[in-house]
Amino acid sequence: MRTTLNLDEDIIAELKEQAKSDGITITAVANLVLRRGLNRLCEKNRQKKTYQEKPIEMGVPVVTMDKALNMVAALEAEEILRKIDLRK
C-alpha cells in the first residue's frame, strides 16, 4: 500500500544508512522499524498493571441498615410528592 509520510531529515538519514548497510530498501527498513515499534507499544499496553484498591477498616457503622433504608424511603416519598406537585 502506498502512502505519504513527512519524516524528519535525521530519520531519513538513519533509514538510508540502515538500508545501505543491510542491502535492503528504505521501505523495507521503515516497515521493519515501524513493526518493531508498534509491537513494543502493544506489549507495553498489555503489561500495564491493574489498579488495586487497598481496603481500610472504617469502624462500626454509625447508622444501622434499618435506619438507612427508612431514610431512603422517606427521601423517595418526598421526591414522588414533589413530582406530583409539579404536575398540578
Image: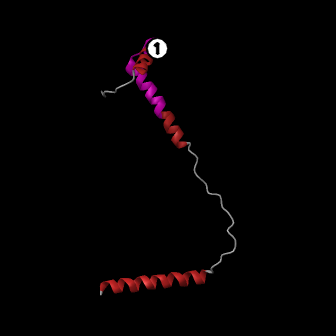
* Main SS class of the magenta portion in the image: helix
Q: Report the span colored magenta.
A: 17-38
Between 34 and 1, the one nearer to me in the picture: 34
The one nearer the camera, 24 or 37, is 37
Q: Position of residue 35 (x, y in %)?
A: 45, 30
For the point 49% across and 38% down, which residue is it?
A: 42
Nearer to the camera, 82 or 7 = 82
Where 68 falls versus 55 (above or below)?
Answer: below
Q: Quadrant of the N terminus?
A: top left
- Is residue 25 in the magenta section? yes
Magenta-colored stretch includes residue 88: no
Q: What's the amino acid at mark 1? A: Asp
From the viewer's perspective, is 1 left or right of 58? left
Percent coordinates x, y for residue 85 in the rendering: 34, 86
Q: Position of residue 70 (x, y in %)?
A: 54, 85
Is 71 left or right of 32, judged from the image as shown?
Answer: right
**Which residue is at a point 48% across and 34% down the rendered structure image?**
39
* Above or below for 71 versus 46: below
Q: Secondary structure at mark 1?
A: helix
- Quarter of the image holding residue 28? top left
Q: Residue at x 57, y 80 (%)?
A: 68
* Residue under numbered circle 1: 22
Residue in the image at 57% along x and 50% along y: 50
